[in-house]
Amino acid sequence: MESAENHINMKKVQDVYYTCFLSYFFISLMLLVVGYLGYSTIIVNSGFYFALSMILYAMMFIGVKVNSYEFTKKYPYGIGKLHFIFFSLVAVGISFASAIIISISVGGMARGALTYVDSIAVIAHVIAIVFNEMLRRYLEQASVRLSYKRFLKHSRETWVGLMVLVVAIACIILRQLGVVNIEYIGSICISVVILITSVIFLKLAFDGLTDYRSVKPKEVQKVIGSMPDITEIKEIKTRSIGYEMYELDLALVVDGAFTVKKAELLEKSIKEKIKEYLPNIKIVMVDFT
């Protein structure tokens, strides 16, 4: 068995996430400013969606960076789960803002209120589409160049952002052509997408808080199951101690005639093998019975 993760340059992975963060920061800021100055709920909502994506990549960047740190005496168990809590609060905040925009949109439809948009809004969305497409290709190339399959998954997720932008442009153009309330309808649709995305992010954060996405016992069994001197794997427990960082607790049954010295050597061998093939496991606790 060979660990592919060990051959990945994690510094370059950080750089890719940082580039994605900056790209989404630019897109969200541009759309939020244009939407605010143009009194357009649909443009502001587009900006909110990309702000949510920006926060996601910021969390990815921080997570990968923290994973590269060695645990210190001050923080022997890592950074805990604060990032999951922060992530949840941000997702709730953006969901709340999007829900407010739904309320404003419904109210605007009821009053027959008008919004001000112009060609600058269309240009801003076209620029955002170009950046979104460039980012998709960049992630695809990075997944091949760095052998990091997660980037390929991220590249496929950019289609949601593309759909948000296309819907926004269509609604803006139709509004300028005189279609009543179309921008409010489009704004509500994008708000629903943001709410669904926020729920997905909240689930990911909840999975981290509850250790649902911890390393599965079968993965550990594959690594140490064939090691000599281990007669039975009695218990395997894992828990999250940071972004994609885990602690592993093992209860193993060995030969009753095992000496203390031999147990120490076996424990060292187990820890080295676990960290080699499962690098996300940062702490290994072994109990022999």
Image (tube, helix red, strand yellow):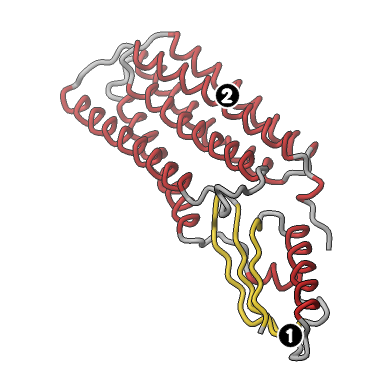
**Left or right placement of residue 186 versus residue 203 in this view:** left
Would you name the residue on which mark 2 appears? Answer: 22
Q: Residue at x 57, y 61 (%)?
A: 214
Q: CA distance from mark 2 to mark 1?
A: 52 Å
Question: Does residue 16 sit above or below 2 in this rendering?
Answer: above
Q: Quadrant of the C terminus?
A: bottom right
Question: Does residue 289 sit above or below 11 in this rendering?
Answer: below
> How far across and down, in percent of the image, does residue 121 sit?
43, 13
Q: Residue at x 70, y 29 (%)?
A: 138
Furthest-bottom residue in this view: 256
Foreground of the two, 151 or 60: 60
At label 1, counting other C-alpha atoms closer than 10 Å, the crowd grade (few under 14, some 14-19, many 20 or more) is: some
Foreground of the two, 75 or 221: 75
In the picture, residue 250 is in which quadrant?
bottom right
> How far across and down, in percent of the image, does residue 204 sit?
49, 51
Question: Does residue 254 sit above or below 136 in this rendering?
Answer: below
> How far across and down, in percent of the image, does residue 139 sit?
69, 34
Would you name the residue on which mark 1 appears? Answer: 254
Amino acid at the residue labelled 1: Val
**Left or right placement of residue 157 versus residue 46 in this view:** right
Amino acid at the residue labelled 2: Leu
Q: Residue at x 67, y 80 (%)?
A: 288
Q: Secondary structure at mark 1?
A: strand
> How far across and down, in percent of the image, does residue 177 sit?
36, 14
